Amino acid sequence: MILRKHLPGLAAGTIVGALVAGGISVASAATPGTGHAAKSHPAAAKGDRRAAAGLAARAEHGTFVVRGKKGVERTLDVQRGTLTAVSASSVTIKSLDGFTATYALAPTSRLRVDGAGKAPASTLRTGEKAAVTAVHTATGDTVLTLRAGKATTKAPAKAGSPTA
């Protein structure tokens, strides 16, 4: 399925973009009992985003904090999986590991279906693959961006493949 090729990239792009916009660097944890502080990942220090993108491409779901341009922190949730419920006001997504979450839709939510431009919630269908980025608050999660459906563009061929 073409979407399987694109969905990890969409999720990775969302996560990496949020990390970069928030000024977060990839860090390795200190070894317990050594007293050494955490160091920045060498790839991040060189400006190489590939290490973060590779990790983000495999992410099923997660929560992280980003700092905006005005210094305001926001907690974001990301998830990819299958739409299990859709209404005019919310969507529910289930990841491969069984994690399920419901996200509110707002007038500011940016929805993309089948690779097309902005789409209304009525075009979302249960059973479609989806990737979401949502703002997390004490009252719930609200969709910032949601991409769903079949990809409409062909993925670039890899070097050495029969179609390259």
Image: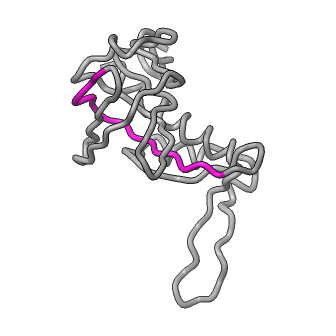
The residue at the far front in this view is 139
Q: Quadrant of the N terminus?
A: top left
The structure residue drawn at horizontal position 29% and vertical position 34%, both measured from the top left corner, is 92
Residue 117: horizontal and vertical position, in percent? 51, 10
The structure residue drawn at horizontal position 26% and vertical position 39%, both measured from the top left corner, is 94
Q: Is residue 83 above or below residue 153?
A: below
Location of residue 41 (image quadrant): bottom right
Query: Is 18 colored magenta in this rendering?
Result: no
Q: Is residue 64 above or below residue 53?
A: below
137 left or right of 74? left
Residue 122: horizontal and vertical position, in percent? 33, 12
Q: In the rendered structure, which segment of residues is drawn in magenta?
A: 73-87
Query: Is 82 colored magenta in this rendering?
Result: yes
From the viewer's side, name the closer residue of 43 and 147. 147
Q: Is residue 82 above or below residue 32?
A: above
Location of residue 20 (image quadrant): top right
The structure residue drawn at horizontal position 32% and vertical position 29%, both measured from the top left corner, is 91
Q: Is residue 125 above or below residue 146?
A: above
From the viewer's side, name the closer residue of 73 and 54. 73
From the viewer's side, name the closer residue of 65 and 9. 65
Q: Main secondary structure of the magenta part?
A: strand
Residue 52: horizontal and vertical position, in percent? 57, 48
Residue 121: horizontal and vertical position, in percent? 37, 16
